[in-house]
Image: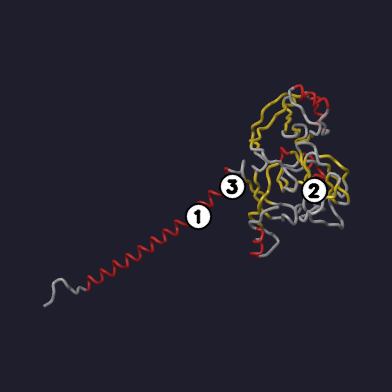
Amino acid sequence: MRSKNKVNDPSSVLKEKGHSSKRTSSHKNVDTRKKKNIVLEYIQVIAVAFALVFGFMRPFVVEAFKIPSASMEDTLLIGDRILVAKFMYGITVPFVRFHSFDLSPEFQSHLDSYRVSQEIRQEFENNGIILSENAGVTVQDANSKWIIGDTDRTYIIIKKGGKLKVYKPLHILNMNKPKIGDIFVFDPPEAAGKKQPFIKRIVAVSGDTVEIKDGNLYRNGSLVVGENYVKRYLIAPQSPQFMPPIKVPEGHVFAMGDNRDRSSDSRVWGFVPIENIKGQAFMIYWSWDRYAQGLDKIRISRIGRILR
C-alpha cells in the first residue's frame, strides 16, 4: 500500500529545485551588493580625505603643490606633487589683521630702500612697539605693501588713502620656528618678480651671517659641510658663486635650492619674511615624468617618500 504522504510528484520536485535556485541567486545578489557597498565606502572615504586635504583643511592644515622647476633636484623633481603642513610654523588666520597705528607717507622711501630707519623705530616706539636692532624690511608689493619682521612678530604696512597703515596679523599655534634644513613653501618677495609659491630649503635663520665663496655656503664664518642633498654643477654654474657676508634680519630666513648651481634663491632676491611662509613640505604623494613613455611616466618609487 502506498502512503498518501509520499507523493512522487514531478512538479513538486521542480518547484523545490526552483526555490533552491532562487535562494542561490539571492545569496549571490547579496554578496554582490555587499562588495559594491564596500567599494562605495572606500570611494567615500577617499573622496572625504581629498575634500579635507584639498578643500576644508587647505587654508589651515595641509595643501598640495606641484614642482615646476629643477631648483630642488635631486630632492624634488619636476612633476613631483607634494603635501605641505601649513600648521608647522603656526597658522596665520586669513584676512584677520589688527590695525596698530598710521605712519607718515614720508617714511615710504625708507621702506622702499629696505631700511628700518631710526625715524621709523621712533614712530613704532611712540606707539608702544620696540623694534629690535635686527628688525628687517621686505618689499611685498611696490608702492603698496611692506613687511617688517622682528624677533617673534611681524608687522604689515599697507598704503591706504595716502597713509601707511601698520597692521599686526593674527597668528596662532606658533610654537615651532623655521629651522635650518627645513624644506618649505613660501610666497616670494617682491624682488623675485614672481607670484606663484616657491619651494627651497632654509640654510640660515635670523641672526645668522651668510656668505658664499666659490659656490660654497659659509654660515657664521664656517664652511657648511655634510649637506648630502646638495647637487653641484662646477662647470658653467648659473647661480651666484660669491656673496659677501650678510646678516639675516629678524623675522626672515635665508633660502637656497638643493640644486645649488641651478637655483634662483636668496642669493638673488634676498631674505624670505616669515610672514610669507606657507608651510613645511613633508611628503611626495604623486610623481609624473612627462618625458617618459607609458607606465614609466609614473615614478612609483617616489610616491609616499618622506622629505628630509
Q: Are marks 1 and 2 in contact (CB under 8 Å)?
A: no
Q: Distance between the residues labelled 1 and 2?
A: 43 Å
User: Residue visible at 19% across and 74% down?
Assistant: 8
Q: Residues within 10 Å of mark 3 (few under 14, many from 20)?
A: some
Q: Say which residue label 3 marks.
A: 53
User: Residue visible at 73% across and 30% down?
Assistant: 158
For this orientation, the residue located farthest to the top is 126
Nearest to the eye among marks 1 and 2: give it.
1
The amino acid beneath tag 1 is Tyr
Pick the front one: 71 or 159: 71
Q: How far across and how far down the image is residue 212, in percent?
A: 86, 47
The amino acid beneath tag 3 is Val
Q: Quadrant of residue 26?
A: bottom left
Marked residue nearer the N-terminal end (1 or 3): 1
Residue 145 in the figure: left or right of residue 26: right
Q: Say which residue label 1 marks.
A: 42
The amino acid beneath tag 2 is Ser
